[in-house]
Amino acid sequence: MASSSLVTQSFYTSFSLSHRLHVPEPYLLFRSSLCRKPISLSATSSSSSSSPPIFLSCFDDPPQENVPEPHNPTIITYDEEEEDEEEEDPILKFFKSRTLTAEDPPQESKFSLQKNRRTSWHLASNFSDLETEIDPDPTKPVSLANQQTPGVHNTPSVAVEILDIAKNLTENQTLGEMLSGFEKRVSDKECVEALVVMGESGFIKSCLYFYEWMSLQNPSLVSPRASSVLFTLLGREGMADMILLLLRNLPDKDEFRDVRLYNAAISGLSASQKYDDALEVYESMDKINVVPDNVTCAVLITTMRKAGRSAKQVWEIFEKMSEKGVRCWSLDVFGGLVKSFCDEGLKEEALVIQTEMEKRGIRSNTIVYNTLMDAYNKSNHIEEVEGLFAEMRGKGLKTTSATYNILMDAYARRMQPDIVETLLQEMEGLGLEPDVKSYTCLISAYGRTKKMSDMAADAFLRMKKVGLKPTSHSYTALIHAYS
């Protein structure tokens, strides 16, 4: 607990954002990590008439470059010396007033979900030890931005016609060449619908040619919404270079200085694992007076976390955006903050953020609870895991397989296979199918208990009998049972 307090001393500003963060010299600030050539987002030209085919030469062979793995997070070390109480930072007082002090309870022999001794717990994370599904999908930022550019529910006939043409193109034909009969017949809204149906059908190259065709019409049919949809589709395909090319050549009109368009671009670049480019696009928004919103904040936090940025750096971005007047108080933003802090083992700080989130009327969801449960499980704080689970159910939140897997892993660590069996039955009673992770927890629970290796083998056979394929974790747990 003392180490957590030391972390708090040097890590954060006041949650009210009224005090600036005092950063010691060794810390690397966020801006210093982006020492790359800035991206210019200003269009080179603008016209309501036909424009030259600036993208067409790049469409024949969309880039398929290998995406580099994100680098490891920067490891930050903290000074062990205690500061004078008179100079104590206000955020330290804030965190200290909400810091856990109780120790983890001794091993219990029976299964009892206790009421949490804290007034308010909450959040969710990845069950990374057993490869759970808690971590957001890499394309989540794309869907997050795309909520502002909704898809098609009733596909118009024009979009269907264009899709049919795309499906029947020969090897040497491009979509733009086959649309000679559609001039003056397609509206900008119908163009968006056509992009969506072609993208969802997998015709990304045809989307690019169609977008080029749109830009050559008089007047141009390219709209901010069409660009947003295309950025989202390109991000899902990992075509970050094409996103940057199109972004640089947007029409120089006020309507294209739309935050939703830039949210989609940042999301697409993040989904393509081009995290530095995504951060540079965000930095460039200030230069063209595009004001970020809460979606920008949520997407950026996810991007920074995936890029390996520290919780401190993520907090700085949140603070800067809040100081600019951006209303960052949303579930997505707080969920990202809690995840960043839990990833670094800063569980108590994550709880403070979650408590503040509840005070502001933002109710925690299942993913938030799973995140906190997983973080405390990794620290072997079983009572806290129990408390979170009990509170989660008390609020009527729907538990998932990941929730039970975390709880079962906690009791497997405590060598209590009887409780793991009970939880497995409870899962099935709720209609949740136990997966390979669930059975691996059971194998591990028996394997860690003396003279129960036969029960571990039986659990392994039960898993195979229901058609689940064992993983390396499953085999490792079984081997340990006989070691």
Image (cartoon, helix red, strand yellow):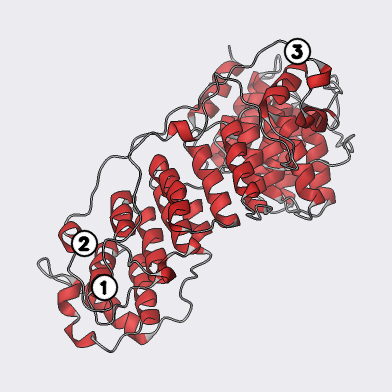
* Residue placed under numbered mark 2 in the picture: 55
| Cα–Cα span, label 1 and label 2 | 10 Å
Q: Nearer the viewer, mark 2 or mark 3?
A: 3
First along the sequence among labels 2 and 3: 2
SS for tag 1?
helix
| Cα–Cα span, label 3 and label 1 | 62 Å
Quarter of the image for the C terminus: give it. top right
The amino acid beneath tag 2 is Phe
Q: Position of residue 437 (x, y in %)?
A: 59, 36
> In the displayed structure, would residue 250 be above or below residue 127?
below
Q: Position of residue 322 (x, y in %)?
A: 65, 48
With 88 as the anchor, is 377 left or right in this view? left
The amino acid beneath tag 3 is Glu
* Residue placed under numbered mark 3 in the picture: 82
> In the displayed structure, would residue 76 be above or below residue 406?
above
* Residue placed under numbered mark 1 in the picture: 215
Quarter of the image for the N terminus: give it. top right
With 390 as the anchor, is 225 left or right in this view? left
Task: Identify the residue at horizontal 71%, vertical 46% (top origin).
Answer: 427
Task: Identify the residue at horizontal 82%, vertical 29% (top origin).
Answer: 93
